[in-house]
Amino acid sequence: MSSNGTAHMDMPVVPSTELTQTFGVLLIGFIFTATLYGLTFFQTYIYYTRFPGDDKSIKSIVGLLWALDTAVTTLVSHTIYHFLVTDFMIPFSQLITTKTFIAEIALSGFVALVVQCYYASRLWTVSFKQTILPTAVAALALAAFAFNLATIAKLIHQPLFSRVVSSGVKLTKGISTGLVLAGDLLIAGSMLWYLRPSRNPGMALPNGWYEKIVVYGINRGTCFAIFQVAVLITLVTMPDQQVWLIFHWVGGKVYVNSTFSMLNFRNTHHGRGVPEEASLNQNARGSAGRTGTYTTRSGLSGGADSSHSVQFNVHADAKSGGAMNIELDMVRSQGDMAYDDVDVSSLIYRNGIGLWSLLVLGLNRVKT
């Protein structure tokens, strides 16, 4: 018994503040990562259930992002298990950087590239096929991915995890993050500008505070831009700590969930998603209940070079024989909807917004 007591006395005692700033930070980041992966899985299920008739390219992007997010979550889980279980008795300053950690950095950079390129295609659509902004976003995304690969090359030659943000890594990772942030700000600003109500007078507007948070805070790209700001600030000001990893891990989930949120928030028509700028609200037909047409260049059937018109309150004898005209009886009206036009987004995000609130509160607590 005395030998056990002696062994216990010989064990190094690590201050609680050091544990909080090292292993505690990694654990908190993993908790949020696992939680948001659950939201990713849920949103993936919602998408394939509500939009079976969507274009194959959009379905492929959703499937790719889900697969990448699953792989990233697996890599983060292995990293945490290795540090907190396998190498639990090794001091933090002597931990060796795992291959799964490096692979996660690489995949997260690819996730940001895919998401930003998809948002660039959306900018091309909502800007009526103007190429300057989408090209700028795509160029920034590719440049950021290239610097992220340079970061990976430097991480391979930095064995100690505590010094993972060395001078060389800090430079390339900082440039990569800055380029990603520039693209995010361009995306968020452009989406807010082109999808403003005054430019789209017939577009359905978000109702209630939760829909406004989802539309303006998440779907437009504002949320992942905020997280990239947090990554850049913590990376530059606290390179010797791992606080930046929380925002890095969570930021990848925010990219994926923002994209899925934008897709799932659309209304449906015969299994296809109706683009936000093509959705109609009650103000589109006025108090007299007039019929009318709202034209969009987004292409309900996925065509890239054709405009489509969405007609509402069109009688059977008034329909044109053109294949490009469809009948859509007030996508967000309160009654007379087809079954597949029922708007379940409010149900989804009324429950899902709690996850975002928990995330924000938790991160604020970590920062303080």
Image (cartoon, rainbow, N blue to C red):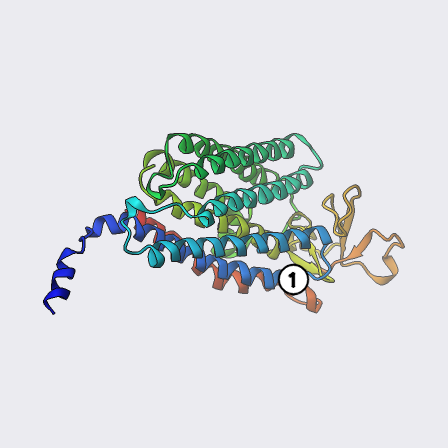
Please tell me in which quadrant of the rendered image residue 307 appears: top right
Is 316 positioned to the left or the right of 358 in the image?
A: right
Using the image as rendered, state which of residue 254 and residue 290 is in the foreground: 254
Using the image as rendered, state which of residue 294 and residue 304 is in the foreground: 304
Outermost residue to the left: 2
Name the residue at 56% across, 54% down: 261
Using the image as rendered, state which of residue 328 and residue 43 is in the foreground: 43
For the residue carrying disc 1, how many other residues have a C-alpha within 10 Å: few (<14), some (14-19), or many (20+)? some
Q: How far across and down, in percent of the image, does residue 312 sit?
A: 75, 56
Q: Is residue 279 visible?
A: no
Q: Is residue 124 visible?
A: yes
Is 313 positioned to the left or the right of 60 in the image?
A: right
Q: Against 229, is 359 above or below?
A: below
Outermost residue to the right: 321
Q: How far across and down, in percent of the image, does residue 67 sit?
A: 58, 55
User: Mark 1: which secondary structure?
Assistant: helix
Q: How far across and down, in percent of the image, does residue 228 sit?
A: 45, 40
- Which residue is labeled 1 in the image? 48
Is 242 positioned to the left or the right of 275 in the image?
A: left
Using the image as rendered, state which of residue 158 and residue 1 is in the foreground: 1
Q: Quadrant of the N terminus?
A: bottom left
Name the residue at 48% across, 41% down: 225
Please tell me in which quadrant of the rendered image residue 138 appears: top right
Amino acid carrying label 1: it is Tyr
Name the residue at 31% across, 41% down: 241
